[in-house]
Image (spheres, rainbow, N blue to C red):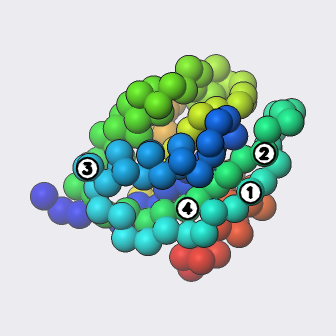
Amino acid sequence: MSQHTVVLLLGSNIGEQKKNIDTALNKISEACSILKKSEYLTSEPVEFASSNIFCNIATIISTHLSPIQLLDYVKKIEIEMGRLTDSTISKVYTDRIIDIDIVKYDELKFSSERLEIPHKKHLFEREFSQILLKNFS
């Protein structure tokens, strides 16, 4: 099985945000190798109103999972950790205990109803994402 290099962004704005992110990273490391992590960064919510500030981190992982397998894996982690809504399905952003987004997967360009790679909003529109990803360029 070949290995793929993937950039993930994780965020949390409910409860103990850093602990939530660390828990998610531990769960990700059960199936993938974590190669590099950014510093934590706090940011205001984007595309919805909330008084809860986000804690975010970017990470580079190595995985044998396909893009859809990886998506299923990170969605399972989100649900296990208590995330109740998926903005991809609901089209509405809300507070969340954990959010895990696939930003890049090798140099792949991929688009489906569930997943778009590269994740254009994180790469080109969201300032906090660009700050975190600058560490990896």
Query: Could you tell me if residue 121 is visible in this image?
Result: yes
Q: Quadrant of the rendered structure where residue 96 is?
A: top right
Residue 68, how many percent across, how many down? Answer: 35, 39
Within 10 angstroms of label 2, few (less than 14), some, or many (20 or more) residues?
some
Q: Where is mark 4, residue-wise?
A: 58
Q: Quadrant of the rendered structure where residue 129 is?
A: bottom right
Disc on the earlier residue, 2 or 1: 1
The span from disc 4 to disc 3 (Cα, nearest Å) is 17 Å
| Residue at the farthest left position | 1
Disc on the earlier residue, 4 or 2: 2
Instruction: Note whether 34 is above or below 93 in the view shown.
Output: below
The span from disc 4 to disc 1 (Cα, nearest Å) is 12 Å
SS for dot 4: strand
Q: Where is mark 1, residue-wise?
A: 42
Q: Where is mark 2, residue-wise?
A: 53
The span from disc 2 to disc 1 (Cα, nearest Å) is 7 Å
Of residues 135 and 12, the one nearer the viewer is 12
Does residue 37 appear left or right of residue 94 in this picture?
left
Q: Where is mark 3, residue-wise?
A: 31
For the residues carrying marks 4 and 1, which lies nearer the camera in this image? 1
SS for dot 1: strand
The span from disc 4 to disc 2 (Cα, nearest Å) is 17 Å
Residue 4, how many percent across, how many down? Answer: 30, 63
Residues under numbered marks 2 and 1 in contact, where contact means CB atoms less than 8 Å apart: yes
Amino acid marked by disc 3: Ala
Residue 9, how many percent across, how many down? Answer: 55, 54
Disc on the earlier residue, 1 or 3: 3
Which residue is pictured at 48% across the width and 52% down the height? 22
Disc on the earlier residue, 4 or 1: 1
Residues under numbered marks 4 and 3 in contact, where contact means CB atoms less than 8 Å apart: no
Which residue is pictured at 78% across the width and 61% down the height? 127
Amino acid marked by disc 1: Thr
